[in-house]
Image (cartoon, rainbow, N blue to C red):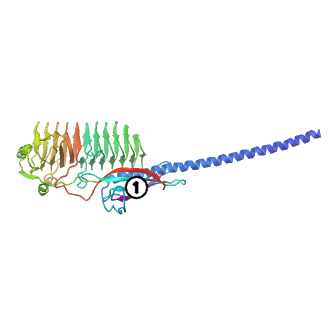
Amino acid sequence: MHRFLNHAQQENGIAMITVMLTSMVVIGLSLTAVQLSQHGLSSTATDRKRIQAVDAAEAGLDITLAALQANPYPTLPCTVAGTLSDVPTTASYSVAITYYPTFPPSGAPLTCASGVSAQPAAAELASTGDTQSAVGGKRQMDALVKLSPVAGSSSGFNRAIFSDQGPVLNNTLTINGYSGQDGDIYSNGNVTCNNAATVHGSVYTQGTAFLNNGCNITVDLYAKGNLTTNNASSIGHDAISSQGNISLGNTSTVSHDATAKGTNTGGTVTGQRRSNQTGIPDPPTASLPTLNWNAAAWTSAGYTLVDEGTNCTQAHNDIATMNTATVNTVYRITGSCQVTWTNNETVTVARDLAVVADGGFLWNNSFKLKSSVAGLKHKVWWIVPSDAVTVSSPCQSSDGGVHDMLANNANSSTSDITVFFYTPCNISMNNAISGGGQIYGGRVKINNAFTLNYVPADIPGAASATTTLYTVAISYKRETPA
């Protein structure tokens, strides 16, 4: 009996040791699991910061690319910075820009303080992204871009359509580019685009932008105010609202990034969707260029001046003789009469033609403009000069008044004719209008089956400017060590 008790006590000791050893193993495994978990959490936090920082750096590049196209020389930005209200922490970007006079870059860079010192041909961008997270580091994205001057930008005539007040673009409108996708539209008002319209370029507006029922912008839509789309409208690159909100219809698409100072909802965004952003540059600011009557500029450019006085009927009859002209001709008409073409008239030109009429123009049904020799290119200018509009003779609120341009029903020009329209007042083009050139007006309204092939015009008498806008071509975009 005594031996049995001793044997049991020995076994109890072994059991105690076994329990202690097992506990030590469990504790060791638990500590290892905790360490692995902490390491995993730290790695996740680091990865999250890295991804957020890279996204912020790339956002900085995208916003800077927009700024390079929005701001003319010499006011191009030297740096760009802003914040992104991302989750779970706020991210930020800071972009340093180095300009060069040649592309590819060589030699010393241009100086940049309040603006760049000379016209650039290239820019190197270094965008650093960071977040408020305590772990992880900053990330950097670099890009090299080629800067090409926009045709006509030195005189301010660098858009396919310029409407000082908000343009209305309705029903099967097509704007084609001159060199790629550069058929741009600019407005200091609100832009409305309705029903099966396609702009092969960008739209810039100091007001709001509204795209409805299949309005398609192939490059950027850049609005200062709210940007709204409905029903299968599309934006081929960036959608930007520098001071407002973005609201995309359910079937609307943005093929790159959508960036807004306020809310940013709806539709499909292929790239980054960013809301509550700061530091977004506003669209470029531009006024309707001044184009006063300058007889000396036209004669210096090789035009023969015909002064018609206030006789619009005589001007109409003389313009009809341009089919046998041997010199480029500018017709000048003063007074309030409108130069008018009635139904089914054709103007045939053997030389370049300019008509500068204070009272404006009216083209009625089936007006046609063509070259006397098919394929031989000519230029035509229809101009109401800026100085025709005075306090005693202002622009009218409705279409077709003094200083206005009104085109109705199946007006066209052949592909060998470039046409430039300019008035500080109203331009209205209705029903099956087509041709190549530019349209500049105080308010532009276009309806029904309109096609414009953008061709920049050199305009005698246009005031030259010291500013130049640029198009941007990306040579590379890559991540580099910060």
Tell me if residue 467 can be seen.
yes
Residue at the (72%, 44%) spot, across then down: 26
Q: Position of residue 6 (x, y in %)?
A: 91, 42
Extent of the magenta region? 90-100
Report the residue marked by disc 1.
Answer: 125
Image position of 194 (left or right of 134): left
The image shows residue 269, relative to residue 154, as above or below, that is above
Residue at the (30%, 48%) spot, across then down: 204
Q: Position of residue 413 (x, y in %)?
A: 17, 40
Q: Quadrant of the N terminus?
A: top right
Tell me if residue 397 can be seen.
no
Is 93 covered by the magenta stretch? Answer: yes
The amino acid type of the residue labelled 1 equals Leu
**Prevailing secondary structure class for the magenta stretch in the rendered image:** strand
How crowded pointer 1 is (Cα within 10 Å; few <14, some 14-19, many 20+) is rated as many
**Residue 261 or residue 281, whichever sits in front:** 281
Q: Position of residue 176 (x, y in %)?
A: 26, 42
Q: Position of residue 315 (x, y in %)?
A: 7, 46
- Label 1: element kind: strand
**Residue 399 or residue 99, whichever sits in front:** 99
Is 64 covered by the magenta stretch? Answer: no
**Residue 14 or residue 121, whichever sits in front:** 121
Q: Residue furthest right?
A: 1
The image shows residue 32, relative to residue 466, as above or below, that is above
